[in-house]
Amino acid sequence: MDFRQELVDIITKSGAHPAYGVNHCFRVYHMAKELSNGIPLDDEVLYTAAMLHDIGKYPVYALKNIDHALRSKGVTSNLLQQMMFSPIKLPIVLDAVENHMYYSEPGRSDEAVYLRDSDILDNFGNIGLMRLFSLVGHDELVMTTENAVDRARLFADALPRKVSTKAGKRLAVKRREETLRFLSGIKRQTAEFAWL
């Protein structure tokens, strides 16, 4: 079986919620490539890190009270060693996985920086809103639609400042505007959020 397909199969069998599953991973991978236009990245490293960056939050691998980025790093290390992944590239993938969250500093490689920016950007704007509202009732931080609205506001305010690349910052402005337009419309249509 092809290595890339093997990674997809691992995610598919992991019980991942669609908001964090294969399509999220593909979007993060392709956005990182788009944002890094003209900067040579190791495609194998980027693809592998994009596919496995959230694996620690999937039901098959998740552990309670363990940060999913750290758990993802451990699971990724085990899986890739079993798959005989390049020992030279493994530390680069692990750094990218460990440091993909908005509350982390970017990792040391270009692949890690672009992966992190792409993951952040997938959390707001139209796609981020779709993901967020799909999680209502399935995520301890988003148990109600009110929680989702509050989180959307928080993401629109905080996440653009977390993006570090020039191309990512430009896209963050657009995605912030998308989020704010949505929130403004919802506010008008629900009597200031009272009828959510």
Image (tube, grey):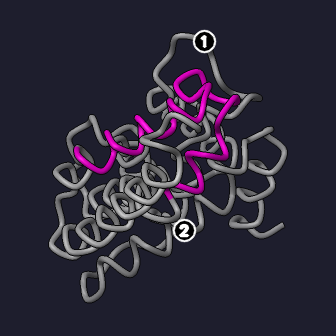
**Magenta-drawn stretch, dominant element (helix, strand or loop):** helix
| Crowd band around label 1 with a 10 angstrom C-alpha radius: few (<14), some (14–19), many (20+) | few
Specify whether residue 106 is painted magenta: no
Tell which of 4 and 85 is nearer to you.
4
The reply, left or right, for residue 60 in relation to residue 20 is: right
x and y percentages locating residue 120 in the rendered image: 36, 53
The residue where tag 1 is placed is 64
| 151 relative to 112 in the view: left or right | right
Name which of mark 2 and mark 1 comes first in the sequence: 2
Q: What segment is highlighted magenta in the picture?
A: 128-157
Q: Where is residue 136 in the image (x, y as percent from the top left)?
A: 65, 35
Q: In which quarter of the image is the C terminus?
A: top right
Would you say the residues marked 2 and 1 are in contact, meaning their CB atoms lie under 8 Å apart?
Answer: no
- Residue wearing tag 2: 27
Residue 160 position within the rendered picture, expressed as x and y whole percent measured from the top left:
22, 55
* Residue 120 versus residue 140 in the image, above or below: below
Judged from the image, the secondary structure of the residue bearing numbered disc 1 is: loop
Q: Which SS class for mark 2?
A: helix
Residue 36 as seen in the image, left or right of residue 194: left
Residue 51 spot, x, y in % from top left = 59, 56
Q: Residue at 20% of width from left, 49% of height from top?
A: 162
Residue at the spot 42% in from the left edge and 41% down from the top edge: 192
**Displayed quadrant of residue 101:** top left
In the rendered image, the residue lying farthest to the top is 65
- Residue 130 painted magenta: yes
Asked if residue 109 is positioned above or below residue 4 in the image, the reply reads above
Q: Residues within 10 Å of mark 2 (few under 14, many from 20)?
A: some
Left or right of 62, for residue 183: left
Residue plotted at (74% across, 59% down): 8
| Type of amino acid under label 1 | Lys
